[in-house]
Image (cartoon, rainbow, N blue to C red):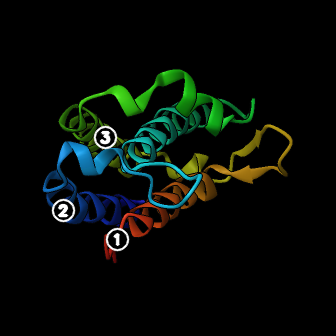
Amino acid sequence: MKALSAKLLHLIDTAEPVLARIDESLSKERLLAGGWSRKQLVGHLIDSASNNHQRFVRASLQESLTLPGYDQDGNVRVQAFQHVAWPQLLALWSSYNRFLAHVIAHLPESKLQTACHIGDDAPVTLEFLATDYVAHLKHHLQQMGIAAK
């Protein structure tokens, strides 16, 4: 998991300066018609960090994990990310993800195969959740035009 942690840190280090150069007005513009703005995407990524943080820790402490699914549109709407200052969102996103990289690096090897039931989806392992989290982050960074490797 240390390699996955390093990959997450690399994504943050690559994306953070690019995102920081985006001004407030551009951060509010929708990337696609009817889609989310950069602010909303970063807010969604903060939600993803928060949800997965709980999943990672709880799955490490239990024999199996069962948690509800995630209403991404509802969460973006209720938290009104569009009305948060861009630098504040970026600071929270980067800080939270740096901490998650630490958590991922320290996930117990013995718990990586813990079955995780999230909403109505088929069960997956803790290792899958962590790997998928980083892939999900990379996907959204690419949507924002960041060439993340």
| Residue located beneath label 1 in the image | 145
Q: Badge 3, how many Cα within 10 Å: few under 14, some, many 20+?
A: many
Q: Nearer the viewer, residue 49 or 112?
A: 49
Q: Disc 2 or 3, which lies upstream in sequence? A: 2
Q: Which residue is pictured at 44% across the width and 66% down the height?
A: 143
Instruction: State which quarter of the image contains the N terminus.
Output: bottom left
Task: Residue at 14% x, 58% y: name it.
Answer: 17
Question: Measured from the top left, where is residue 28 in percent x and y?
Answer: 34, 44
- Which mark, by number, is residue 18? 2
Q: Residue under circle 3?
A: 93
Work out how far the residue at label 3 is from the one at label 1, CA to CA, in angstroms. 17 Å
Q: Amino acid at mark 3?
A: Trp
Give the number of the mark in front: 2 or 3.
2
At mark 1, the secondary structure is: loop
Query: Which three-letter amino acid code belongs to the residue tagged 1?
Result: Gly
Cβ atoms at labels 2 and 1 below 8 Å apart? yes
Tag 2, which secondary structure?
helix
Residue appearing at x 60%, y 46% in the figure: 111
Mark number, residue 43: none
Q: Residue 68: image x %, image y %?
A: 75, 29
User: Which of pointers 3 and 1 lies earlier in the amino acid sequence?
Assistant: 3
